[in-house]
Image (tube, helix red, strand yellow):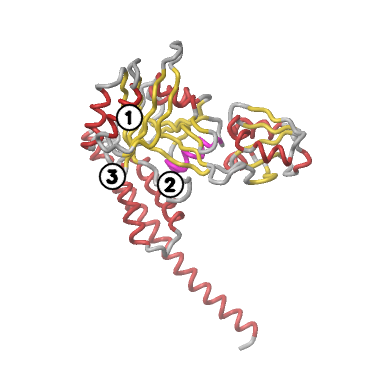
Amino acid sequence: MSENQEKKSIQNAIGGIREKIDAIDASILSLLHERIDLAREIGRCKGKDNLATWDPARERQIFQRLEALNQGRFPQESLFSIFREIINTCRASQKPAVIAFLGPEGTFSHLAGIEYFGHSATFRAAETIEDVFIEVERGRATFGVVPVENSIEGAVTSTLDGFMSHGVMICGELNLGISHNLVNRSGRLEDVKTVVSHSQPLAQCRQWLKKNLPDVPTRAVFSTAQAAQMATEDETVAAIASLLAVKTYGLQTVVSGIEDYSGNTTRFLIIGKEHTPPSGADRTSLLVGLVDRPGALYDTLAALADHGINLTRIESRPVKGKPGNYLFFLDMLGHIDDEEINRGCEALRAKVAQFKWLGSYPRDSRENGNGR
């Protein structure tokens, strides 16, 4: 067989395979049409009974079934990403969701919102974390995305304060792996005369900055996206920002992955107004104020331990205007509708001066910010 004949044979083979791929794509599209029609039908049924469009237990079942059916043939993280977008798009067809996040566009909160709700949702940037709470509380947003803790820098106090003063519920959580990138207009390190970012990324990259840009001043600004905006306006300014911010503001990456520690993860909470039914793998969050007496904290923790409750986090915050008074944020495994969790919470309620259930919600299986 001549070289030309061999090339023609290969091209014919590729052409035949591509025809099969085109047929598969057409079948997938047809099935997507059928799926979104069925989703809309479910939405109409739920609307008659005033049921929530979001069913976390159902979504968890879908992903578990997909994992079993897949048997590792298709990369699992990519498979889940595809179906998460499909599910979110179908849910949005039932009732469009407005998602508030700490803006402007391109922040890690924005990235977390896209990861959780997909690109089909409508995103609304808020100027502060408190504004996210206000948007949800007043019904101008369906859900909000707020950071609550970072694996390196600890609690995000603005979010904890928001739960103290606003009437919202936690509906979900997302553990997002954080990778910081030094970005500017030119993509050249030698052009950097100032580094700007939010205070937490600056803190998470301080050793890298000290080693590689020892004489370059840093400046804390409101958000990583604001930093990216500043970098677009001044060629001497570099920002520490997400890849989403790079795409949003047309910047170039100078150095990627400049965080000082690997495994840097931020936990985001999804806030809303609706009670979330059990999914089978949940977390419950509480806000409690202790009685002012010796042993109060011990009695609080004992009330939970006596009911076999696994407490996963405890964080204290001072009560503003009341020196020496603290409120405690508690996270535990399980749902408020679970018998033992319910009994434990009732026992706790009897021992504390203040008790507020912040929500029970599906916990993210990506504890390290990686794939499911």
Furthest-bottom residue in view?
A: 1
Identify the mark nearer the N-term, 1 or 2: 1
Q: What residue did someone put label 1 on?
A: 301
- Residue kind at label 2, given as amino acid type: Arg
Spot occupied by residue 111 in the image (x, y as percentages of width and height): 51, 40
Task: Please provide the residue range marked out in magenta.
Answer: 107-120
Image check: 119 left or right of 286? Answer: right
Give the residue drawn at x 46%, y 64%: 22
Name the image quarter holding residue 222. top right
Give the residue drawn at x 36%, y 57%: 67
| Residue closer to the observer: 291 or 28 | 291
- Residue kind at label 3, given as amino acid type: Gly
Q: What residue did someone put label 2 on?
A: 366
Spot occupied by residue 356 in the image (x, y as percentages of width and height): 32, 23
Please indicate, yes or no, whether residue 120 appears anywhere in the rendered image.
no
Identify the mark nearer the N-term, 2 or 3: 3
